[in-house]
Image (tube, rainbow, N blue to C red):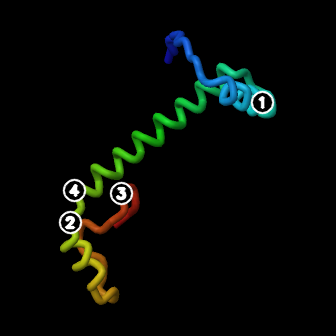
Amino acid sequence: MTTRISSYSLRPPASIKAEAEKLARAGGTSLNQFVATAVAEKVATLRTATYFAERRARADRAAFDRLLARDGREPPQPGDEHPGQPG
């Protein structure tokens, strides 16, 4: 896999830049790497939030309530097997 590098002129307030530089130095990394990692973490966070919002929208509350109301002593039903596990 190849990574294409692009550039972007970033102009944060001086106080934010100074704090980011201190944190980058303390972590033994460059400011550029610190900022790239911070952006990657933010992107991952937003994508994760979107994923769970989409999952929540597909939720079936009635099916959930039925599942919780089950006795619990019932044997597993066909299709309850864990993928990759013997039935």
Give the mark, 3 or 4, whose residue is nearer the N terminus.
4
**Contact flag, marks 2 and 4 (Cβ < 8 Å):** yes
Disc 1 versus disc 2: distance between alpha carbons? Answer: 48 Å
User: Is label 2 or label 3 in front?
Assistant: 2
Q: Is residue 5 among what the camera can see?
A: no
Q: Which residue lies at the image location 47% right of the left edge and 42% below the top edge?
A: 45
Q: Which residue lies at the image location 38% right of the left edge and 63% below the top edge?
A: 86
**Within 10 angstroms of label 2, few (less than 14), some, or many (20 or more) residues?**
few
- Residue picked out by circle 4: 58
- Residue picked out by circle 2: 60
Residue 40, how many percent across, how many down?
53, 31
Disc 3 versus disc 1: distance between alpha carbons? Answer: 47 Å
Helix, strand or loop at label 4? It is loop
Q: Is residue 23 among what the camera can see?
A: yes
User: Is label 1 or label 2 in front?
Assistant: 1
| Image vertical order of residue 82 relative to residue 50, above or below | below
**Within 10 angstroms of label 3, few (less than 14), some, or many (20 or more) residues?**
few
Q: Is residue 18 left or right of residue 50?
A: right
Q: Amino acid at mark 2?
A: Asp
Q: Is residue 50 left or right of residue 31?
A: left
Q: Amino acid at mark 3?
A: Pro
- Residue picked out by circle 1: 22
User: Is label 3 or label 1 in front?
Assistant: 1
Disc 2 versus disc 4: distance between alpha carbons? Answer: 7 Å
Q: Which mark is residue 83?
A: 3
Disc 3 versus disc 4: distance between alpha carbons? Answer: 22 Å
Residue 28, how many percent across, how many down?
79, 28
Disc 2 versus disc 3: distance between alpha carbons? Answer: 22 Å
Q: Amino acid at mark 4?
A: Arg
